[in-house]
Structure formats: structure tokens, C-alpha cells
Amino acid sequence: MGPTGSQAIPWPMESTIAHTASALANRSSMAKSCTHLAPASKRAKRGRMILPNIAQTTRDVAAHYNDLDAFYREIWGEHVHHGYWETGQESPAQAVEALTGLVASHLALRPGQRVCDIGCGYGASARLLAARHGVRVTGLTVSAAQAQVARQAGVNVLHKDWLENGLEAASFEAAYAIESSEHMPDKPKFFAEAFRVLKPGGRLVVCAWLAAEAPAPWEVHHLLEPICREGRLPSMGSESEYREMAREAGFAVESVRDISAQVSRTWWLCARRFLGRVAMQPRYARYLLDAKAGNRVFALTLFRILLAYRTKSMRYGVFTFVRPGDESTPSG
């Protein structure tokens, strides 16, 4: 997610969250020291995708972003994704553009190329890439609210489900998904569709929220499963699972980067802005108290994600995949 505004972090909030994270970490250590007493069915297994205990559908994802449209635009801004603090000195606005810039560098864009933005949000990244690299971007989103804003900003956007996109095969030189694959109910099909629409030699960059490879049961129960349920994620995969799904679709894995340390500041900023608005704007408090507002639960996820990063239960990965074809493609 991409917030804008002051980078200052109020120390009482940091102290409280740090204390909670420390307590959870201690709990993890105790659990690990006693794992020989726990039945195998109670332990998290390596390579098992995290699933919410209430199934999340594409319709749920669309409703989430439509219902919280104003919330996202006010808290996150036009870029609905993490910021990337490469030096640590970037402003929040610079950081969100830096993440898009990182994606562009891995795509190795050239003027005139056709590029697909899978889960384009409000189209901010699409506009940035088109302006800086001279590419032609087509975006897709399941949210009608996001599609309307993106079109008003001049983005070529399709209000469609990526898993049923209907795009012509081998029609793009590059594609990217910035924090949208997490919302796909069928992740193998997400990769299969990307492979289908890319030309031979085409490149796919995926920025994704990832689960740790072998999370402890308490991490799944208190952090990862609720993050999926509250954030409308049908599942959360690990780095190894993303590698495997991409390979099964036919991609070569060129590179994988864990940039968790460079993006986690996003959630401190979002939490600070959110709490400020709850305190100063009555409509935020009214929404949180409205029992009919099913997506209000996402407010809890802000703080769960802070803890998930602090405890390394959740990671952030940037993957570069290549469809084999005209160019030599290394495999990793």
C-alpha cells in the first residue's frame, strides 16, 4: 500500500506494538521448544498455503475495494501498494513511486511495448510507466470504483477478472502484478493466464505478500489466517510456492528479492494516518461502529500486518519471471 504524508511515528504506538511483538516472539520461542509435545496435525507444515477459515471470493475482493474506496484513496493515495525505501530517506510519495520504478527495472521496458497491469488499482503505476518509459499499458481490476477513477485519469482499464480476462494470447511484451496475486482464488491459473498473454521472451514481475516458509501455529492462527480473512485474500503463498506455480505454468525464474525491510515502514505510516482520521473525522468512527459495514474489519489488519512483519511471519517478495522464447532465460 502506498501512503502519503509525514513519516513521523508516534512513540506510544511504536512502544505498544513493539511490546506486543516481543510477547508474541517469546510465545513463538516457547512453542518451538515444546514442539515435540504437539501432534503433527497442530503444527504448521512447510509449503502449505495459508487459507482463511471463511472462503474469500473474487466478488468479496471487489466489494472490499468498492466499499473502502474513499478509505483507500485518503489513507493510501492513488498508489494502492507498499512504498519502497531503498535508502531510507525517501518521502512516502517517493517511496511508492520507487516500488513502481523497481518493477520497471525488472521488466526492462522499451518504448512502444504493450504492457499488462494485472490488478491495476487506480491506474497510478500504469500512468507512471507510460509517462516514463513510453509503453502502452492495459490495466485490469475487479473493482468498479477503481476502474472509474482510472478511466477518468486516462488509463486504458478493463473492469474484468484476470482469471477470466479474455485477452488475446501472446499479445503483451511484459506484465506485472503489484500486490494483486494475493487476491486471486486460483493462483496457478493466475500464472497460467500471464504465460498465455505474454509473447515468447516476455517478462512478468510479481510483487507479493508472502507467508513465512514454516510459520508456527500461533503465527497462522493470530496473524496470517486473520490477515487473509480480513484483507479478502483467498490464500497467501510462500516464496517456494510462488516459484513452483510459476515453473508449472512454464515460466523460468530469473530472480527473487525479499524487500520486507525496505517496505514494512508502509504500515507504520498507514496506522498513524488511520488513527489520526478516526480521532479527527467522525465519519471514520461511525463506519467502524456500523455493524452492517462488513469490510470495517480491515482496520484490524493494519496492526496485524505490523506484527507479522516484526515477527517475520509475513514477507514481501519481488519475483521476475520470463516466458522462454527468443531470449536466453536463466532459471533459479
Image (spheres, rainbow, N blue to C red):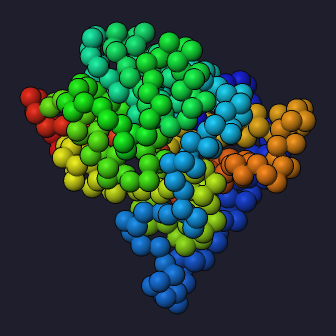
Q: Quick check: can you spot residue 90?
A: no
Q: Quadrant of the N terminus?
A: top right
Tell me which residue sits at (26%, 46%) in the image: 192
**Residue 187 visible within the image:** yes
Query: Left or right: where does residue 89 sit relative to residue 330?
Result: right
Instruction: State the residue in front, 303 or 134.
Output: 134
Residue for point 13% across, 37% down: 324
Choose top left, top right, bottom left or bottom right for residue 91: top right
Side (left or right) of 99 relative to 300:
left
Residue 220 x/y as whole percent: 55, 66
Between 114 and 103, the residue placed more toward the observer is: 114
The residue shown at (52%, 42%) is 261
Relative to the observer, which residue lies in front, 222 or 183? Answer: 183
Q: Is residue 74 above or below residue 240?
A: above
Where is residue 113 drawn, in percent x and y? Answer: 27, 16
The picture quadrant where one finds residue 208 is top left
Whether 203 is drawn above or below 27: the answer is: above
Left or right, residue 10 beside residue 116 = right
Q: Residue at x 27, y 55 (%)?
A: 244
